[in-house]
Amino acid sequence: MPFLAFPNPGGSYAVGQCDALWKDGTGKKLMVRIFYPVDKDSTVGLQNAAWLPETYGAKTISYAEAYAKFMWRPGINASLIGTLGFWPLMSNVKTQTWKDAPLCESLPKFRPIVYSHGLGGSRSCYSAVCVDLASHGYFVVALEHTDGSACLSVHSDGTVLEHSFVPPLAIIPVKQRRIPGGFTKSLIPRSQPMPMTQYEFRNKQLIKRATEMSFAADCLERLSEGKDPDLVALPPALAEWVVGRLDMGRLSAVGHSFGASTCLTACHQDQRFRACVAHDAWLFPLSESVATGALRVPTLFLNADTFEMLWPEEGNKLLYSLTRRSRAKKVSVRAFGVNGTKHQNYSDFPVIAPELTGAMGVRGSTDADEALRTINACGASFLDFHLAPDAPAPGPR
């Protein structure tokens, strides 16, 4: 079962990659992976960056094992698959990026993006999307959320945060909390210390995730202003060259599944975000204020053929009502289906493990590379249009 290479990015720039631990001095910290534009002639002699994140010597399982643990739940099968199957294969995967490459000198400014992963994801498993955006001149910060939704998060200081699993019996199954226009039953979390509804559990995670999106925006502002380099750390190839070059007036949010609803929430709450791209959004966890209102910024929904399965009966209703209310406020919202795709086609797994994802039935009938090229081209075009220098400010007009 070979793990294959990533498709070439569609933009005109090479792409650099680095990991960083960002802090605020009060205990809040977040592990991020940064993808950024690089001049092609500056990559000579550099090495391609690894796809799988490091564990920095911490006493924990590997990210390969964590992916298996999330897919097959804790147990002997997941441990064996992760140790004997995923780790030997995933550890050799390289991205279409250059490790700690010098920042592009030919671009005066970079448009920043904050990327939010889906349930069971990490800062690495959407590299194909992030690399493509960076090749178009974007400075992409992929988060590794600390709410327990990541498969694993190992910080460079040795902190380990594992995925939260809870038995379904801890969830109150009756009288699901409803929001006008939606919210019945959906995915059930596997472990929870206190009884609560499915919606309350996921919405609590969503709220924390959205605050981490804003925290990342705070850190980007500090980077651009050259403030707190000990808290918002970067490799030397980036640190001194990024000051004054991040165009925070054109900040956007991109995410998949749970990450897509995280982006919708962050854009609703944080006025700094100017546009949003939502990949196969899992709309179930949205707060009432977001679900019943209008979107604030131009938003592109790209959905798989299986979108209806994410939240049966209710997902399409909410997407339609959100789109209708937003357009009534003159906010640009577009929703398209990408034919022949399933939920995981928006992640890296179908392109690096086509046989495995095909056997598991989690990728669609369209060639995985072609599906990602379509997804990436749509997202980049949408952001390029709405973040152009002469684009109107977001919000009702």
Image (spheres, rainbow, N blue to C red):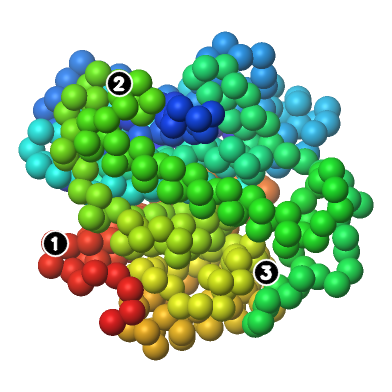
Real-space CA distance between mark 3 and mark 1, rounded to the nearest whole angstrom:
37 Å
Residue 234 in view (yes/no): no
Image coordinates of residue 18 in percent, x first then y, are 35, 27
Q: Position of residue 155 (x, y in %)?
A: 53, 24
Which mark is drawn over residue 235? 2
Task: Give the CA distance from mark 1 to mark 2.
Answer: 30 Å
Quadrant (top left/top right/bottom left/bottom right) for the N terminus: top right
Vertical order, 259 against 8 (above or below): below
Residue under the image location 66 percent in, 14 percent down: 59
Say whether residue 216 is visible.
yes
Residue matched to label 3: 311
Q: Determine the residue located farthest toward the front in the rendered image.
A: 26
Dot in front, 3 or 1: 1
Kind of residue at disc 2: Pro
Question: What residue is disc 1 on?
Answer: 389
Q: Residue at x 50, y 30 (%)?
A: 26
